[in-house]
Image (cartoon, helix red, strand yellow):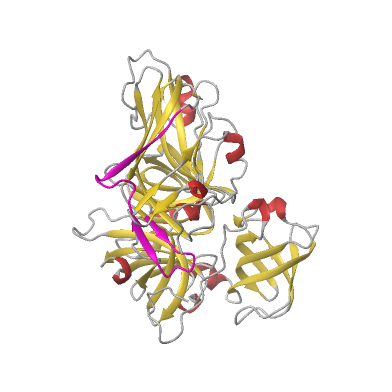
Amino acid sequence: MIRRHRTSSRPSARLALLQVACAVAALAGCGGGGPDMLGTGTGGTAQTQSVLQTYITDNLATDYSKVWVSIRKITAVDASGTEVTLLDATAAPVVVNLSSLASVGQFLSTVKIPAGVYGEVRVTLDNSVQLVSLDGATTITAKLTATGTEFVVHVRNIDLDTAANGQLVLDFNLARFTYDPLTGLVTPTIEAPKPSDAFGKFVRQQAEVHGTVKSVDTTAQTLVIDDARLGSGIVVSLATDAVILDEASGKTVTLAGIAAGARVEIKGVVTPGTTTADPVTVTASVIHIEPANPAPGLVRVGGAGKVISVSGNLVTVALDEANFLPGANSVVVDVSTAEFEHGQLSDLSAGVGVAFRGTLSGTGTSAQVMATAIDVRGAPSQSDRQQNPGQTFSAVNGAIANLNPDGTFTVTVTRADGPVVVPGLYTVDASKATYMEGNASCLAAGAVVQAVGSLVNTTLTAKFMNVKGCAGETHSEPPPPAAPPPAASAASGAH
């Protein structure tokens, strides 16, 4: 049951904006020379400029399993009342499930604004908030204000000095949100804590790159992307076992198959430079080459989450991330014509993490996605499976028995885990894994871990790692949803 007022002392939900400033004189080192992204009120050309890179993050309170909001715009206001734009997503609002960003910094934008001190930030949200109950059975669509299509949250009395450090954190404090079921209104609370308190909790930083390929380096296995929001000169490298999918043909290609000028969509892990003058790099596990002439009228969507159930080619997914407001906790994904980037149909079972892209039909509980591509998180690619036919997609859950000198560690599994893993000792290589909860410093004898990746005999090469209870984020990786009973609707998401 959703309470009208909450006074919980649990961790709040943060929407953090990490803004790393560098002077305009060093603009080339910051990826300058691309699209001009000046905000309003920039003044004359002689005015000193700062480059700001914007991230969002979250630290979820536990009243709801999902809290979906749409961000239209973020602006900053100086002492004279001049307002500059940090993010403009008016045409296509950024849809965020705050609960999916626990300990994660989401790279949002890069802008050039006049250097100075800003005392207020204004966050414009769509006038719609979706609240999903803890069991996933109920989705409430609430509003922020009784009328209108948007709502502006004013965060005042801040001291954003772009010449000093250029860092700003906005804290969407879910523990202090209130929901009135009589009016259907949510009252948000946004604060501005010290950046060091928020940034120190980032387990990883991630980005979604949507842009034009500027150049390709097949020797270094990198490409450079110009993105209208993230800025120009984004350097993208390929993760081990990365897959590049040409959506026009539905085939996988090599890096050499990406031409300069192509439109791409990439999701990956962000590595900021050691100084503000260094370019941001993104390590991608999947790259989508978008069609030059997409079919008109189709609503193209993407999302990610955990499988609830599988019925033939229909996969019900409890959504953690999406670029659309889902209207329900889950969505049915038809994978009958989808290209599997990593994994295969037999890898899909309750609790497995997946990401998908495709076209959407219907809304709410009747929504269905016809997938063009699906990615089983942690599973080997088709080429990797061919080169190593003995490997199996699996997960190892248990306590670390010991850390080995070569950097691997041994995990004691005390019960059977799926069709592959049986009780015993397993060696885990997490040297190239992405940590979904915790980090490498959390690895110690006795720590409880979940490693997902490719298993050969009793050695698992992890692609994703969870270290339970580390970094204070005990709820950042909830248990997988239980499969519904046979008579239940596959799309209900109820237990």
Residue 104 position within the rendered picture, expressed as x and y whole percent measured from the top left: 54, 49
Q: Is residue 134 left or right of residue 426?
A: left
Which residues are the magenta region? 130-156
Q: Is residue 440 left or right of residue 348?
A: right
Q: Residue 257 lies in what quarter of the image?
A: bottom left
Q: Residue at x 48, y 61 (%)?
A: 65
Is 178 in front, or is 245?
178
Q: Is residue 371 above or below residue 76?
A: below
- How many numbered callouts? 0
Q: Residue 114 lies in what quarter of the image?
A: top left
Q: Is residue 49 above or below residue 404?
A: above
Instruction: Check the image and name the residue furthest to the left.
Output: 296
Q: Is residue 230 left or right of residue 440?
A: left
Q: Residue 72 lies in what quarter of the image?
A: top left
Instruction: Check the image and name the residue furthest to the front.
Output: 182
Is 24 in front, or is 260?
24
Tell me if I can see residue 370 in this picture: no
Tell me if I can see residue 433 in this picture: yes
Residue 99 position within the rendered picture, expressed as x and y whole percent measured from the top left: 49, 55
Residue 203 position within the rendered picture, expressed as x and y whole percent measured from the top left: 60, 49
Q: Residue at x 40, y 87 (%)?
A: 487
Does the magenta-highlighted stretch encompass residue 54?
no
Residue 282 position within the rendered picture, expressed as x and y whole percent measured from the top left: 50, 46
Does the magenta-highlighted stretch encompass residue 142?
yes
Is 210 in front, or is 311?
311
Q: Is residue 345 above or below residue 404?
A: below
Is 477 in front, or is 338?
477
Q: Is residue 196 above or below residue 347?
A: above
